[in-house]
Image (tube, helix red, strand yellow):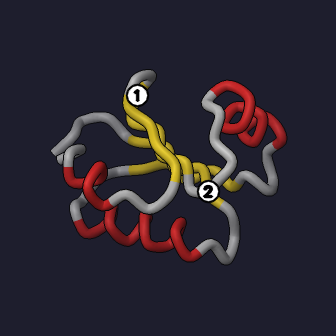
Amino acid sequence: MAETTVTVYSKPACVQCTATKRALDSKSIRYEEIDLTTSDAALEYVTEDLGYSQAPVVVADDHNHWSGFRPDLISKLT
């Protein structure tokens, strides 16, 4: 299992966000969730710095991040 905690930038009532969190939970991957609707700084980070426009955005490290529900990439974190 990965030693680091990934960050999941999500939005309420987001089907792909829920699927992503369930997949992380099923693999016992620790994550911190940040609600993009309550944090202007987080929203700016994922849209301006990372260039994503779709939630969820999963950030494992500076070079390993993606947008949307990606079970293939979640599997690589284990």
Residue 43 shown left or right of residue 40 in the figure: left
x then y, percent, for residue 41 = 78, 34
Is the C-beta separation of discs 2 and 1 under 8 Å? Answer: no
Residue 78 shown left or right of residue 30 in the figure: left
Which residue type carries mark 1?
Answer: Asp
Which residue type carries mark 2?
Answer: Ala
Q: Residue at x 37, y 40 (%)?
A: 5
- Disc sitting over residue 61 in the figure: 1
| Residue situated in front as seen by the camera: 34 or 71 | 71
x then y, percent, for residue 67 = 52, 49
Residue 1 quadrant: top left
What is the tally of numbered marks visible in this picture?
A: 2
Count residues near mark 2 (Cα–Cα under 10 Å), then give few for <14, some for 14-19, many for 20+: many
Residue 40 shown left or right of residue 15 in the figure: right
Q: Pick whichever of labels 2 and 1 is earlier in the sequence.
A: 2
- Helix, strand or loop at label 2? It is loop
**Of discs 2 and 1, which sits in the foreground?**
2
- Helix, strand or loop at label 1? It is strand
x then y, percent, for residue 43 = 75, 42
Give the spatial CA distance, label 2 vs label 1. Answer: 17 Å
Q: Residue at x 70, y 31 (%)?
A: 45
Q: Residue at x 52, y 69 (%)?
A: 16
- Disc sitting over residue 10 in the figure: none
Count residues near mark 1 (Cα–Cα under 10 Å), then give few for <14, some for 14-19, many for 20+: few
**Quick check: 40 above or below 33?**
above
Q: Which residue is mark 2?
A: 55
